[in-house]
Amino acid sequence: MSDSPVDSEEVRHVAALARVDLADEEVEEFAAQFADILAYFDALDEVPEVEAEEDLVNVMRPDEVREGLSQEEALSNATETEDGYFRGPRVS
């Protein structure tokens, strides 16, 4: 058995579940890549947990009521309108 925590049988099992055919050289390559991925997860386990969540601050500006366009102004550049609404092309 190799030094890798993931052996070729596990790689073949995962490949079978995913319905992926792998050549023998690919099995060894994926075993090494899976080992690297597991090492990254081990590194994440070493990250200390935060005691408390930081206070969330709303970064949005407050709403301000402003003058908008009239319906006539909004429709003034429309190619086609119907009963005071924009008219677009048929979808189906």
Image (spheres, rainbow, N blue to C red):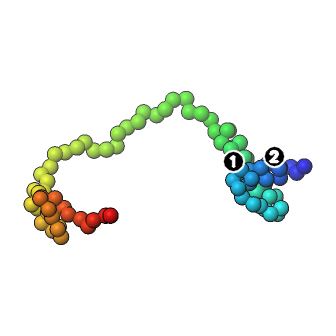
The secondary element bearing badge 2 is classed as: loop
Among the two numbered marks 1 and 2 on one chain, the one whose residue lies closer to the N terminus: 2
Residue 50 position in % (x across, y down): 56, 33
Closer to us: 74 or 82: 82
**Residue at coordinates 86% horizontally, 49% vertically from top-left?**
3
* Mark 1 nearby-residue class (10 Å; few <14, some 14–19, many ≥20): few
In which quadrant of the rendered view does residue 79 lie? bottom left
**Residue at coordinates 31% horizontally, 64% vertically from top-left?**
91
Residue 73 position in % (x across, y down): 11, 61
Residue bearing mark 2: 5
Position of the C terminus, as image quadrant, is bottom left
| Numbered label attached to residue 63 | none
| Numbered label attached to residue 40 | 1
Q: Identify whether 16 is placed above or below 45.
A: below
> Left or right of 19: which side holds 6?
right
Closer to us: 46 or 16: 16
> Left or right of 80: which side holds 49?
right
> Left or right of 45: which side holds 90?
left
Residue 43 position in % (x across, y down): 69, 43
The secondary element bearing badge 1 is classed as: helix
Q: Is residue 74 visible?
A: no
**Residue at coordinates 41% horizontally, 36% vertically from top-left?**
56
In which quadrant of the rendered view does residue 23 lie? bottom right
**Amino acid beneath label 2:** Pro
Residue 85 position in % (x across, y down): 16, 59
Closer to us: 49 or 92: 92
